[in-house]
Image (cartoon, rainbow, N blue to C red):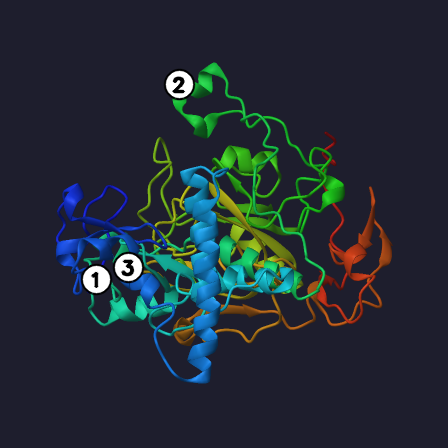
Amino acid sequence: MELPCDGAGICMVCKNKPPSEETLACKTCVTPWHATCLVSPPQALSDTLQWECPDCSMIHPPSTSAFASGRSEDSGDLIASIRKIEDDKSLTEQEKAKKRQELLSGAAAGPSSLDGEEKKEKNDVLDILDKELTCSFCMQMLDRPVTTPCGHNFCLKCFQRWIGQGKRTCAYCRVQIPPKIASQPRINSTLVIAIRMARMSRSSNAGGAAKVYHFVHNQNRPDKAYTTERAKKAGKANACSGKIFVTVAPDHFGPIPAENDPERNMGVLVGEIWEDRLACRQWGAHLPHVAGIAGQSTYGAQSVALSGGYIDDEDHGEWFLYTGSGGRDLSGNKRTNKDQSFDQKFDKMNEALRLSCLKGYPVRVVRSHKEKRSSYAPETGVRYDGVYRIEKCWRKNGIQGFKVCRYLFVRCDNEPAPWTSDVQGDRPRPLPVIKELKNAIDITERKGSPSWDYEASSNSFTSMVHCSNESFILKCPKMLTFASQDDKSCWMWKKPPPASKKELLIV
């Protein structure tokens, strides 16, 4: 294999830095090569002045076919363009190198052209990053990408299947995969955003209207939640939580829309990340800064937090199995006791979740980086992942031998999840098969129609329902956007949301 010298002047074949008398520079691309490592080095000194490197000489190989002749003419135009750049005295060496690179990268995709539309097509992000965004297993666009320490990307399910076969090396380069990555792979959220933006760019180039997504989170981040001197000594768990930045009641169900966000006028965005639970509380996504469930036993649950509190939890992204609260001795200073010592029951917060299951209320879900077993948890901080609906709940014997309350959450949000490269939200999906239901007791399943459901038409978005302290407009959160389009569908309130029992927060 013939390879040039790298940026430091070291030959990529013999790994040595050749002396200047053994270095050849291509007359076309001016790339340095080690003459000794070449298969066919120039025989005479005069030949070195007109020497072309193997890469440039392959651009126009000799051939008598009409096709090859056409390609040769195009390559000749390319070389003429490069030589024109070299002769331009107004350009610096750095500018010449940049222009050469642009021309050569265009030649790899086909005949160069100055036509604006063709150039735009060649610069399509998905085409340029095709290899980087393709899974080496399924050869498809990456779905929930996982990045190994060696820098190669795979679909989450493909990676888990590979690890499940007992393989512990990268399928691409055979570099050893650390045990922590193998047992706890995390989705590369940055790569997810890149794929989604590339798809948006392609749809925009195709002539469709580009939809605006907020990928840069916390761009208008407020001051951190303040703490008292007493709280600083005891730890942040006892800290005052600071100002609430949204104008919703503490028992508000469902997404927090833009009209309740006077600070940014954006609402709480799916994928928004905060430093900790205190900052999350300031934006109303999940108010308790310690407890995993926010709700009232006679009213319903508004939100839950996935933070690795119970070993029975099972996270699959669009759906997860959640374990209720209780069953632990938290007397005295045992606030972090994770050993279960008695059975859980459907009371207090567990009953709040069960009521939300029966009514079909939307439940906001936040994931914490502390959930180390989940591939869908953020790498840092706390992230808002949209609204879910509880489809079933039951009790069963937990891993520690005591009965636990279990809940099946299924995502039903109008915005795409942070781990998917899709550009649209959820659609109704069949419920997953839950094997543990065979030995479950106290099974609760909603019989009637849910309050929050999927509307297949946008013709009847709005209806007014007057509650005790405010008027609710029952609508899809993106109703104003969808109203101008035909046959758009979304998740929305199909029944009036429950009337607030708490004072509205005014900022």
Does residue 55 sit above or below 227 in this rendering?
below
Which image quarter: residue 172?
bottom left
Q: Name the amino acid type tagged 2.
A: Lys
The residue labelled by disc 3 is 53
Percent x, y of residue 393: 51, 65
> How far is the residue under mark 1 from the one under mark 3?
10 Å
Q: Name the amino acid type tagged 3.
A: Cys
Does residue 142 sit above or below 247 in this rendering?
below
Does residue 318 sit above or below 250 in this rendering?
below
> How far is the residue under mark 2 from the one under mark 1?
65 Å
Along the horizontal axis of the image, is 455 left or right of 318? right
Label for residue 172?
A: none
Mark 3, Cα crowd under 10 Å, few <14 / some 14-19 / many 20+, is many
Query: Split into 4 quadrants, where in the image is the C terminus?
Result: top right
Q: Nearer the viewer, mark 1 or mark 3?
A: 3
Percent x, y of residue 406: 46, 61
Label for residue 233?
A: 2
Q: Residue at x 33, y 45 (%)?
A: 338
**Residue 142 visible in the displayed image:** no
**Residue 302 visible in the displayed image:** yes
Q: Secondary structure at mark 2?
A: helix
Q: Name the amino acid type tagged 1.
A: Glu
Q: Residue at x 83, y 62 (%)?
A: 484
Along the horizontal axis of the image, is 152 left or right of 178? right
Q: Earlier in the sequence, mark 1 or mark 3?
A: 1
Q: Earlier in the sequence, mark 3 or mark 2?
A: 3
Along the horizontal axis of the image, is 425 left or right of 183? right
Which image quarter: residue 286?
top right
The residue labelled by disc 1 is 2
Percent x, y of residue 86: 43, 47
Query: Split into 4 quadrants, where in the image is the N terminus?
Result: bottom left
